[in-house]
Image: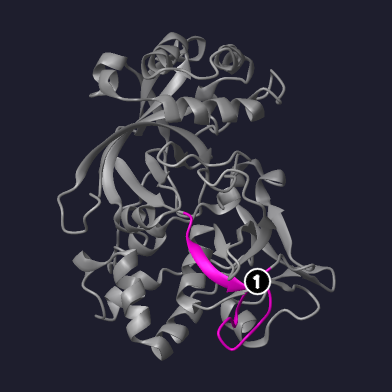
Amino acid sequence: MRAPTALGAAILILATACKPLTGVLPVKPADELVLKRTSYEALEDWAATDTRAAFGAFAASCKKITARKDGDGFGGSPLYGRVAAWRGACDAARQIPSPSAESARRFFETWFVPAQAMNRREPVGLFTGYYEPELTGSRTRTKRFNVPLHKRPSDLVSVDLGAFRPELKGERIAGRVDGGRLVPYATRAEIVATGLAGRSSPIVYVDDAAAAFFLHVQGSGRVRFADGQVIRVAYDGQNGHVYTAIGRMLVDRGEILREQLSMQSIRAWLEAHPAEGHALMNENASYVFFKEQAIADPALGAEGAQGVPLTPEASLAVDRRFHGLGAPMWVDAKAPADGANDDDVVFRRLVVAQDTGGAIRGPVRGDVYWGSSARAESIAGRMAHKGQLYVLLPKAVAAQLN
């Protein structure tokens, strides 16, 4: 999934929520990460929180962290220090294979100091959710299974613009080479209409175009076959076109009330309007390509941008322009209750930054990975909540903060 692009269901919900304004607007200051050192006592509910899932996620991230050079910047902002400062915590984590709730919490208290993340002086940001959907599929095309999930095309070229201009760090484009020039790749509408013969073959075919669309949004998912076999299809590139939020279009056209917008309401509209829904989905030019993966541990998700399998409710997608992957983070926000009509619940949780996403932009912005289940889908599709973010930094790194 998100190795890439952690596009959460939130792209459909939140990227959708604002209509364009007319008139002259003041210039918004550029986002800037500010970290303010604090204490565990300032983290409400910290002492009562079970951090074992986050400990396991951090230990998995350490395999990537310790493979790097000591002098490398940890990632994101220079405020994260260098890789060498993180080795002690990773070495210590290896010595605790099965921590209790208390020893896991004590581990973080021993090695890290919390620092509140702010966007300049603003401490409040947006937290959304994503999940790993499961679809029904077939290796061969049939009358029922007729929606392809394509492999990465042979002629797709992805470009990391930061390799050419430092100020473009974190920005990517994709296209194909034509006459020595990089030109835009085919749009979703073009790919759906004509396919990718000679350039890409489908991994599988599924039986639900709307479900496939949401799979593209999530970035990865599972496909179950008639014989019970389940495979994972993981993100392996995108056609380079900007994602257009169909939820925003439905609100602008008066099809769904803004306050009722969710992944679930969008899905219901698509099912109730199949012909219009097909055209609407094609108005989004973005198209995602996949690769097949075996599922080693059904409890874990696909690999995120750090190359580590995601842990439900303990992995977070962040904006890596500001944050380093592998860093533990404390989220203080709210989340949807299991019941769609129930009041929101408090979400105070230790998570680990292990993923990124096209819609995850800003210093105080996170996308919580909820897992692969009906519950995960329900919660992720409704999560769009304000909250605060705290980064746990190695003590030597935190000591350098103002």
Is residue 374 a member of the stretch shown in magenta? no
As helix, strand or loop, the secondary structure at mark 1 comes to strand
- Left or right of 134? Residue 75 is right
The residue furthest front is 227
Tag 1 residue: 204
The kind of residue on which mark 1 rests is: Val
Task: Report x, y in % for residue 179.
Answer: 84, 74
- Residue 134 showing in the rendered view: yes
- Range shown magenta: 132-150
Q: Residue at (53%, 78%) from the top-left corner?
A: 207
- Asked if residue 285 is positioned above or below residue 32 in the image, the reply reads below
Figure quadrant of the C terminus: top left
Question: Within the image, what quadrant is residue 275 found in?
Answer: bottom left
Residue located 59% across and 68% down the image: 225
Compared across the picture, whether 386 is left or right of 135 comes to: left
> Is 334 situated left or right of 278 in this image?
left
Instruction: Note whether residue 20 is visible.
Output: no
305 or 201: nearer the eye?
Answer: 201
Q: How is the image coloured?
A: one colour
Q: How many marks?
A: 1
State the residue at coordinates (54%, 30%).
Answer: 326
Residue 89 position in % (x across, y down): 55, 14
Question: Residue at the spot x=67%, y=54% of the render?
Answer: 293
Q: Is residue 143 magenta?
A: yes
